[in-house]
């Protein structure tokens, strides 16, 4: 059970998100890139929107961490003059957490195991980010 | 290139290394099994930056012998080739400027031998009708009859989201033997192919739409039920 206090995600009152379309995108990503274990789409303030995760993973925690991670990375990119932030990746000895900006208002988290091919993930993720962005703003 | 795809390193016409996201590498095998401590591996990696030989660094530290390590490396070439061949191959490119592999086979594997061995492995798993990348498994009706520790470990990790490839990485074992084991366990009823509803469980907790903050009064909370679609 989650009790949340609202989000900055700007969806107009009465409109309904196409969760099926978002779920289909997350499913395709896990099917198309070997090593992807879990995915979450969240608002950039850390509120989860839709998640495809294993039972032992809490989407609320992942979303909050990803929002903080992306916020720091975005600020670093702006302060250092690296242009617009597209992604930030955490490398661990057991796997990866990649966080992608979807515009300025939402994000996508991809968790992967040690075998994940980050190059392939980036390649496959670009069109997914475009489509997810379009679904979120529809 | 493809899913999983693979990077074949050749030297003097022989395959000295295959890296594939479908096949756990030597590092995964050594660290998962506890054969080498992570601290020793990391120290050898650091040392090898200057000496350019991870094998020399590992052997020099006395944590593994050259023969044992080479055995794992050659086995890795075979498993990497299998991992690339059993997946989807979209296209291939020849890159003459790629970095040398971290742990090359001293005696490379001749491509025709590798091809023949990989062909035999593909034939061997054909009877299982199990795709190591697409099919996700759950414990079957006879799961409690798993007789060996290896099988019980697979049953414990089979959550319906993991493919044979994912299980190989979770176990720290090679893709081919894990695929064969899962194929046999499917035949014995220890495992079953998971339905899509189990493999992909997207949840939005019954939330219909998020509203802009401006429209939410400070004392008003959105209560979400944990329901799944």
Image: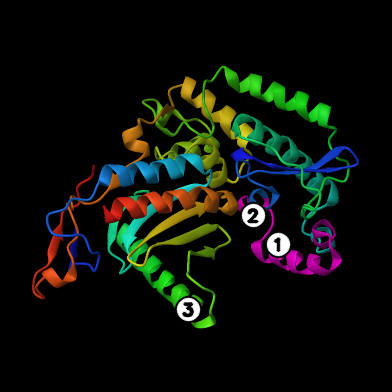
Q: Please give the label number shown on residue B185.
A: none
A40 horizontally vs B113: left or right? left
Q: Which residue is mark 2?
A: B31
User: What is the crowding at mark 3: few (fewer than 14 residues within 10 Å), some, or many (at least 20)?
Assistant: few
Cβ atoms under marks 1 and 2 closer than 8 Å: yes
Q: Main secondary structure of the magenta part?
A: helix
Up-down: is B61 above or below B120?
below
Span highlighted in magenta in the image: B30-57
Of helix, strand and loop, which one carries label 2? helix
In three-dimensional space, the C-alpha distance between marks 3 and 2, rounded to whole angstroms, equals 39 Å
Which one is closest to the eye, mark 3 or mark 1?
3
In three-dimensional space, the C-alpha distance between marks 1 and 2, rounded to whole angstroms, equals 8 Å
Q: Which percent across, then down, holds residue B107? A: 88, 41
- The mark total stands at 3
Q: Which residue is mark 1?
A: B41
A97 horizontally vs B15: left or right? left
Which of A113/B98 is in front?
Answer: B98
In three-dimensional space, the C-alpha distance between marks 3 and 1, rounded to whole angstroms, equals 37 Å
Which one is closest to the eye, mark 3 or mark 2?
3
Which of A78/B138 is in front?
Answer: A78
Q: Please give the label number shown on residue A78.
A: 3
Of helix, strand and loop, which one carries label 3? helix
Which of A111/A17 is in front?
Answer: A17
Q: Which percent across, then down, holds residue B213? A: 18, 70
x 53%, y 25%: residue: B183
Which quadrant of the figure has residue A13?
A: bottom left
Q: Which percent across, then down, holds residue B113? A: 82, 27
* Residue A101 covered by magenta stretch: no
């Amino acid at each position: 059970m989650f009790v949340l206090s609202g989000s900055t995600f700007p969806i107009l009152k009465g409109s309904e998100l196409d969760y099926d379309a978002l779920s289909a995108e997350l499913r395709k990503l896990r099917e198309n890139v070997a090593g992807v274990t879990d995915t979450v789409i969240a608002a950039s303030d850390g509120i989860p929107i839709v998640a495809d995760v294993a039972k032992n993973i809490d989407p609320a925690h992942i979303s909050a961490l990803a929002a903080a991670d992306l916020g720091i990375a975005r600020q670093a990119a702006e302060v250092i003059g690296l242009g617009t932030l597209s992604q930030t990746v955490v490398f661990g000895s057991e796997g990866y957490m990649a966080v992608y900006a979807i515009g300025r208002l939402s994000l996508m988290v991809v968790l992967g195991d040690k075998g994940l091919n980050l190059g392939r993930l980036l390649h496959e993720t670009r069109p997914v980010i475009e489509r997810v962005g379009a679904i979120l703003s529809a | 290139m493809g899913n999983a795809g693979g990077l074949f390193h050749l030297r003097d016409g022989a395959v000295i290394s295959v890296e594939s996201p479908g096949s756990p590498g030597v590092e995964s095998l050594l660290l998962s099994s506890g054969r080498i401590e992570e601290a020793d591996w990391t120290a050898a990696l650091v040392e090898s930056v200057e000496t350019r030989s991870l094998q020399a660094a590992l052997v020099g530290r006395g944590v593994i012998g050259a023969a044992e390590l080479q055995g794992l490396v050659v086995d890795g070439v075979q498993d990497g080739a299998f991992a690339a061949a059993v997946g989807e191959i979209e296209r291939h490119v020849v890159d003459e400027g790629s970095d040398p592999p971290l742990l090359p086979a001293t005696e490379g594997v001749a491509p025709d031998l590798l091809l023949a061995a990989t062909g035999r492995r593909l034939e061997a798993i054909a009877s299982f009708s199990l795709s190591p990348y697409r099919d996700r498994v759950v414990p079957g009706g006879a799961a409690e009859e798993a007789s060996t520790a290896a099988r019980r470990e697979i049953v414990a990790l089979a959550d319906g989201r993991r493919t044979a490839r994912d299980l190989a990485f979770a176990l720290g074992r090679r893709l081919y033997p894990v695929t064969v084991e899962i194929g046999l366990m499917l035949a014995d009823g220890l495992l079953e192919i998971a339905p899509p509803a189990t493999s992909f469980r997207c949840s939005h907790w019954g939330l219909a739409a998020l509203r802009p903050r401006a429209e939410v009064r400070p004392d008003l909370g959105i209560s979400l039920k944990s329901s799944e679609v």
